[in-house]
Image (cartoon, helix red, strand yellow):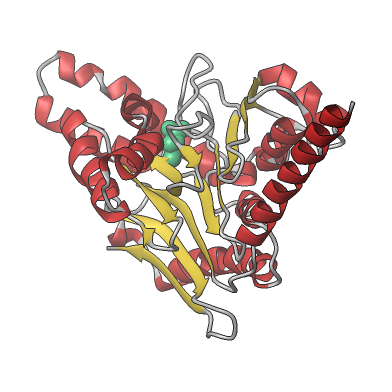
Amino acid sequence: MRILIYILITVCSSSLFAQQTATSNNANTGKYVLVIHGGAGTLNKSQFTPALEARYKSGLDSALLVGNAILEKGGTALDAVEATVKVLENNPLFNAGKGAVFTSEGVNELDAAIMDGKTLAAGSIAGVRTIKNPITAARAVMEKSEHVLLSGRGAEAFAAVQGIEIVDPSYFYTPERWKGLQRAKQRDSLDQLKKVGQTAYANELDEARRKDKYGTVGAVALDTHGNLAAATSTGGMTNKKWGRIGDAPIIGSGTYANNNTVAISCTGWGEYFLRLVMAKSISDRMEFGGQSLALASETLVMKELPALGGDGGLIAVDKNGNIALPFCTEGMYRGFIKKEKQGAAVVKDILIFK
Ligand code: ASP
C-alpha cells in the first residue's frame, strides 16, 4: 500500500511539474507577428487605379488591425488568425466568403482550414455553399468534432448544429465574380483554337486565364506566448468543376502550423500546391533539413512551383518570428504587423506588387 501511495504521489507530482513547465514556456514575451494575404494572381498593375489600390490596402489594413488588437492584449495566435480571416471573408474584394468566385455551375463553393501549431490540432471544411464564415466552421470542426475535414452538405449540417451563421447561397453573389465566370467560360470555348492550330493566340488566353483565377485569403501568427497558428479561406478557382477542391483546406498543402517550425498559408494554383505538399514540405525542410524559412520557402515557391508549371505565393512566420512572403506571380495582396517586445513600437506594412 505504501508503495502504491508513493507511486501515485510521484506520478501526480511529475505531471504537475510537466504542466508547470508548459506554462512557464508560455510566458508572455510581448513579441508577436501577424502576416496576411488576400491572394496572388488576379493582379494586373496596368489595370490598377490608385482608388482601387487604396480600397484593397484599406481592406487588408482593417483585417490586420483586428488581429493586432487580439495579439497585443496577449490573445492567442489561433484567435487572431480566425478573426483576421473573418474580416477578409466579409470583404467582397477578396476571393473568400462574400467575394468567393463562381464554379462552372454558377454557384459558390467555399473551402477553409485552420491549424494550431501548439497542439497540431486542425480543422477544415470543403465545398460548402451556405456557411457565411467558413473559417469559423473550420475552427468548430477542429474544436467540436472528432474529425479534421468535413465537406459539402454534411459540413453545412454540422455548422448549423454548432450555431454558426448560415446564409442563402445568393449572399455570395457579386457582379464582379459573375463577370469573371463569364470571361472564364468564353476562354474555355476559345480553347478550341488550340485544336485548329492557332497556338499563339491560345497561349495568350492561358495567360489571361491564370490572371483571372486566383484569390484566397489567409493569416499566420506568432503570439506573445510563442505559439503559431495558420488559417486559409477561399472560393477556390473560377469556373472550377465537378466538386473540385484545392489546396487551401488540405492540411499540409495550403495550410499548416507547427510550433517547432512555422505557420504557413498559401495562395495560387491549388493543384500544384497539393502536388508539392507545399506547406509541410517547407516545415520539413526546416525541421529535418536545417534550412532557414527564407531558403525553404524561396526554393519551393520560386523554383519548384514554376518548374512544375504552377504559380502563386504564400505567407509564413517561423517560431522565432521571421517572416517570408514569396510569390512568383505579378503581385500578392499582403501585409504584416509585428512588435519585437513589450513596449516596442508596432511595425506595419501592406504591399500589393513586387
Ligand atoms: N489556392 C486556391 C485553390 O486552388 C486558389 C487561390 O489561392 O486563389 O483553390
- Residue situated in front as seen by the camera: 158 or 117: 117
Q: Is residue 52 above or below residue 300?
A: below
Location of residue 296 in the rendering, given as x and y in whole percent from the top left corner: 27, 46
Instruction: Please tell me which residue is depicted at 35% across the width and 53% down the height of the picture.
Output: 43
Q: How many marks?
A: 0
Q: Quadrant of ligand 1?
A: top left
Q: Is residue 220 above or below residue 306?
A: below
Quadrant of residue 269 in the image? top left
**Relative to 167, is 288 on the left or the right?**
left
**Relative to 47, is 111 on the left or the right?**
right
- Residue situated in front as seen by the camera: 50 or 63: 63
Does the image show residue 276? Answer: yes
Location of residue 233 in the rendering, given as x and y in whole percent from the top left corner: 56, 41
Instruction: Please tell me which residue is depicted at 27% across the width and 24% down the height of the picture.
Output: 190
Location of residue 139 in the rendering, given as x and y in whole percent from the top left corner: 70, 39
Quadrant, the C terminus: bottom left
